[in-house]
Amino acid sequence: MAIGIGIVLSLLLTELILRLHNPFETRLRGDRIVLPVARQYRFQNPDVQGLDSVIVHTKNSIGFRGPDPPASGFDGDFVVFVVGGSTTECMYLSDGKDWPTLLGDSLRTVIDSLWINNAGLDGHSTFGHRILLQDVILPYHPDMIVFLLGVNDVGRSDLHAQMAAHLKAGMRFDSLEGLIKSLAAYSETASLTLNLYRYLRAAARGLPHKRVDLQGMPHAIPSAAAIDSAVSVHQRLYIAAYRERIATLVDMCRSAGVTPLLLTQPMLLGSGRDPVTGIDLETVVVAGQTGRERWLVLEAYNDVVREFQNDAGVVVVDLARSMDKSSAYYYDILHFTERGAAEVARIVFAGIVREGRPRLQ
């Protein structure tokens, strides 16, 4: 009994402290987006090539990267938001070097009056994007929303149930995970526990930001049977729900009179040799999977995005197939160096001008 009382009191004290001051930044709490408004980050980078030695990353008055919304409103401006996860936010690229900002620089050569914000949020999936559109972005009545989709949805069976699990609609007792997820809508302690769990899960999949030494990684011959099995599992368990979530985002845009532009997710791994190191990008092993397996699983999700290119009013730019696989463009298997961000901006701009120009005039 004493142990039980001690645990309860400790949890209550932890909850009180976190409610008074939570030093851990949480971007999604229950059904609510928590944006880092008017904040500046400074990072020291001692050894990762392709990034500044001192990185300065600034959030504006609405929690995004880019200029503040004009106080007088968007009178005559072409308004663009870029939505995605960490590969969109570009946390470790200094201000002005993230690809959405560089894209805006290019778009200003063909658009007289442009306002663009980088609304990427590290770790966000299509579930977070839906909330972000509904609560923050659509009220600004943008003309276009650019989505970089895919990697944070891979293998996420929980996302289809999050609509119910994260809303303040009662507690779930069917499993420990369900209990924590539903409690996270009410409790800072549960929310912190859930976000720590997500980070550890991402670390096990090789997704967090960290420099990757391709030359020091193990290699294995890709197994065709293992790859077919892995892709089949994702097709059977996750792809249909992913397609539904993208369709929801597209419908939300259409209903608001917004042009959605969808980008497929590129990755360093997959095929050929890295032109910088000469490493075989198919056989290198990351988190227990060969590069070829990881790439083909991601391509199953990219194929879903490609399906929307035949939908009227939807622009699709196949960034995954257009971007070269080179460690000059990535500091890990997913996240872009400054050169990589510039290349992404170039490809997306070319796709917008070619595919979406009628909506820009």
Image: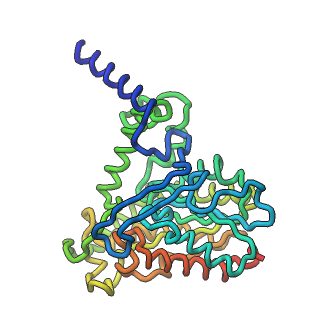
Depth check, front residue: 157 or 92: 92
In which image quadrant can residue 219 be found?
bottom left
| View extreme (top): residue | 1
The residue drawn where x is 45% and y is 47% is: 158
Give the quadrant of the C terminus: bottom right
Q: Position of residue 95 (x, y in %)?
A: 50, 66
**Horizontally, is 357 left or right of 29 in the view?**
right
Q: Position of residue 76 (x, y in %)?
A: 80, 66
Q: Position of residue 350 (x, y in %)?
A: 61, 82
**Horizontally, is 208 left or right of 352 in the view?**
left
Q: Position of residue 243 (x, y in %)?
A: 56, 59
Depth check, front residue: 165 or 7: 7
Tell me if residue 261 comes above or below residue 61 in the rendering: below
Tell me if residue 295 comes above or below residue 163 in the rendering: below
**In the rendered picture of this protein, how many numbered marks are placed on residues?**
0
The residue drawn where x is 44% and y is 79% is: 339
**Horizontally, is 27 left or right of 11 in the view?**
right
- Residue 235 visible here: no
The residue drawn where x is 33% and y is 84% is: 272
- What colouring does the structure picture have? rainbow
Tell me if residue 19 comes above or below residue 192 in the rendering: above
